[in-house]
Amino acid sequence: MKLRIQSINFDSTTTLQSHITKKVQKLEKNFDEIMNVEVYLKVVKPETATNKEAEIKVTIPNIDFFASKTCDSFEEAVDLTIEALEKQIRKHKEKTGKK
């Protein structure tokens, strides 16, 4: 699995990157066909309390899953986005009968 983390208009910390890596690896444990994961982090204008946006695209053979959340912190946004992706992947697995 290839993981790409892109911070748009800011520099992400190594702590944030390791948090993302850890969360994405949990996804891979649940579904081993994941080929690519692209994470986009950006600060949404105007400057409000909930202006940290995480967009994550997960690619498996023939399908892309996508989720996006905006929260107070990037960690929270990533956590909620990963949860949304887990639901999408779980539904896909149930529909296709994959383990």
Image: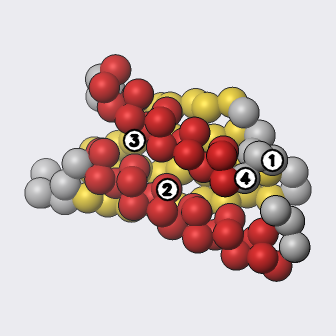
Q: Residue at x 40, y 28 (%)?
A: 17
Q: Residue at x 53, y 50 (%)?
A: 56
Q: Mark 2 or mark 1: which comes first in sequence?
A: 1
- Disc 3 from disc 2: Cα separation: 13 Å
Image depth: mark 3 or mark 1 in front: 1
Judging from the image, what secondary structure is the residue with disc 3 in? strand
Residue 33 visible in image:
yes
Q: Is residue 43 above or below residue 48?
A: above
Return the residue found at the far bottom: 95
Q: Is residue 16 above or below residue 40?
A: above
Q: Which mark is residue 33?
A: 1
Q: Which residue is mark 4?
A: 31
Image depth: mark 4 or mark 2 in front: 4
- Disc 4 from disc 3: Cα separation: 23 Å
Q: Position of residue 39 (x, y in %)?
A: 51, 41
Residue 45 visible in image:
no
Q: Which residue is mark 3?
A: 41
Q: Mark 3 or mark 2: which comes first in sequence?
A: 3
Circle 2: residue type: Ile
Where's the N terminus, which quadrant? top right
Circle 1: residue type: Glu
